[in-house]
Amino acid sequence: MTDCQLYLITPPAIDDVDAFASLYADVLAAGADTPAQIACLQLRLKDVPDEAVLRAADALLPLCQRFDVAFLINDHPHLARKAGADGVHIGQSDTPYDEARKILGPDASIGVTCHNSTHLAMEAGEAGADYVAFGAFYPTGTKQVVHRAEPDILDFWSKATTVPCVAIGGITPDNAAPLIEAGADFIAVSGAVWNAPDGPVAAMGRFAAVLGNKR
Ligand SMILES: Cc1ncc(COP(=O)(O)OP(=O)(O)O)c(N)n1
Ligand SMILES: Cc1ncsc1CCOP(=O)(O)O
Ligand SMILES: [Mg+2]
């Protein structure tokens, strides 16, 4: 089994929070005690009022706590603090790391988008980021991306530092293996789970298979 873990990101829009929470509970249970056991859920709602983020957080945080899954909120450190989240993920155009750390404190988990740049990742790591995220590795319909990363950046990073790295962007069970083998500590996925034709629970089984292979 690899030591690469699954980092799940919510869809960018959730119409029915209670229905999504129920589906997320099924996904959590499907991954529990398998190689696809979810390590982290990132609530990544876009273009919604703060109240919508907090409402979704209220529904999802207890499920994360029950399954020992870290709960991060995307973009907004203040909302992460208000929601009682474990941390925040920030990109290069979001709240700067040092400000996010001041808001959330030393025990929070703060991840930083580093695109395909080891320079950005070194800066984030030296500042104290808890993980760096590289991507996009593959085409994705979830976010308009301008940066493409190659697996060799994962290999370089995992040999050069001890700061965990997350791979993101169009990752599916069929294309995850090169990223796992290159040294990704986490694979961050959204559409491959939530948009799976046979449903998110079935997708978790496929991720368990690829994450269960020897690195
Ligand atoms: C784990 C992870 N990696 C990268 C991103 C992208 O963050 P960002 O560049 O700030 O873009 P948005 O997600 O805010 O559209 C992420 N969210 N999570
Ligand atoms: C948020 C983000 N940042 C770079 S690609 C991406 C989208 C990830 O979603 P998917 O796994 O569906 O490509
Ligand atoms: Mg962002």
Image (cartoon, grey):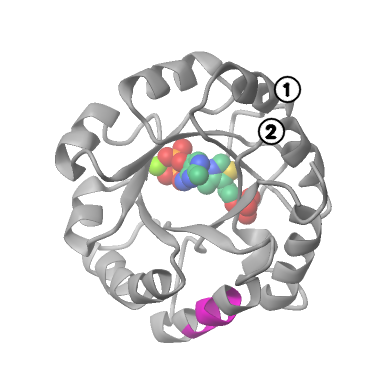
Q: Residue at x 62, y 69 (%)?
A: 194
Dominant secondary structure of the residues highlighted in magenta in the image: helix
Mark sitting on residue 110: none
Q: Please state if 120 lies on the left or on the right of 34 as rendered.
A: left
Residue 62 shows up from this direction: yes
Q: Position of residue 196 (x, y in %)?
A: 72, 70
Q: Amino acid at mark 2?
A: Gly
Q: Position of residue 83 (x, y in %)?
A: 22, 63
**Mark 1: which secondary structure?**
helix
Q: Residue at x 16, y 41 (%)?
A: 103
Q: Position of residue 174 (x, y in %)?
A: 83, 53
Mark sitting on residue 152: 1
- Foreground label between 2 and 1: 2
Q: Is mark 2 within 8 Å of ligand 1?
A: no
Q: Residue at x 22, y 38 (%)?
A: 106
**Mark 2: which secondary structure?**
loop
Mark 2, residue position: 183
Query: Residues in magenta?
Result: 22-27
Q: Quadrant of residue 191?
A: bottom right
Q: Is mark 1 within 8 Å of ligand 2?
A: no
Q: Please state if 38 lies on the left or on the right of 13 as rendered.
A: right
> Which quadrant of the figure shows ligand 3?
top left
Question: Is 203 above or below relative to 130?
Answer: below
Q: Amino acid at mark 1?
A: Asp
Q: From mark 2 to mark 1, how far is it between C-alphas?
A: 9 Å
Residue 196 shows up from this direction: no
